[in-house]
Image (cartoon, rainbow, N blue to C red):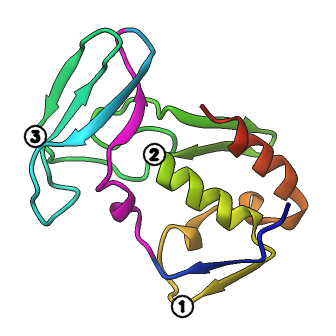
Amino acid sequence: MTVARDLNVGQHIEELLSEPVDVACPNCNAHAVVVALTAKTKVLGRPRRLVCAACGLTRDHAGRMITVHRNGFDPWFDLPLWHTASTPWGTVWAYNDDHRTQLRSFVAAALRERTSSGGWRARLPGWMTSATHRAAILKAIDSMP
């Protein structure tokens, strides 16, 4: 089913990173989360903690010196994201459930409107935004854990 439209209001990736980020635990490969330890206003500079409920692993990160744009990895611990799926054109990934939901809505939309020229939607690769690949990309998103 195709969603009628998606409105790009210019949401930046940093806004998605204000929520917990789902990753694969480096110890047991189960689902783990990276959470902010403080409520500072600067999302990217917040200290973070990696927590795995399956094996009990915890690690802290000072919140500095991060790389936001390493596709498929979290920006603090450089761990593989939990929500990933391969396609013939590349890997589809999401930081968390909210990001996955927004990505699915955007890909499924027949009409993609913009109120801003910025934001993460404007930076998606062409293969992901192509109507030709829509069904395969949606299938990949739906297959993500």
Q: Say which label, 3 or 1, has the lower sequence index.
A: 3
Q: Are marks 2 and 1 in contact (CB under 8 Å)?
A: no
Q: What residue type is labelled 2?
A: Asn
User: Which secondary structure lies at badge 3?
Assistant: loop
Marks 2 and 1, the one that precedes in the sequence: 2
Quick one: SS at disc 2? Answer: loop
Residue at x-position 25% and y-position 47%: 66
- Residue behind mark 3: 62
Say whether residue 16 is magenta.
yes
Residue 115, labelled with which disc? 1
Image quadrant in which you'd find residue 22:
top left
As for residue 37 lying within the magenta part, the answer is: no
Q: How far apart are marks 2 and 3 (CA)?
A: 21 Å
Residue 45 located left or right of residue 26: left
Q: Measured along the vertical axis of the image, is residue 117 above or below residue 92?
A: below
Q: What stretch is highlighted in magenta?
A: 11-27
The quadrant the N terminus occupies is bottom right
Give the residue pinned by disc 2. Answer: 96
Q: Which residue is drawn at 86% across and 53% down?
A: 135
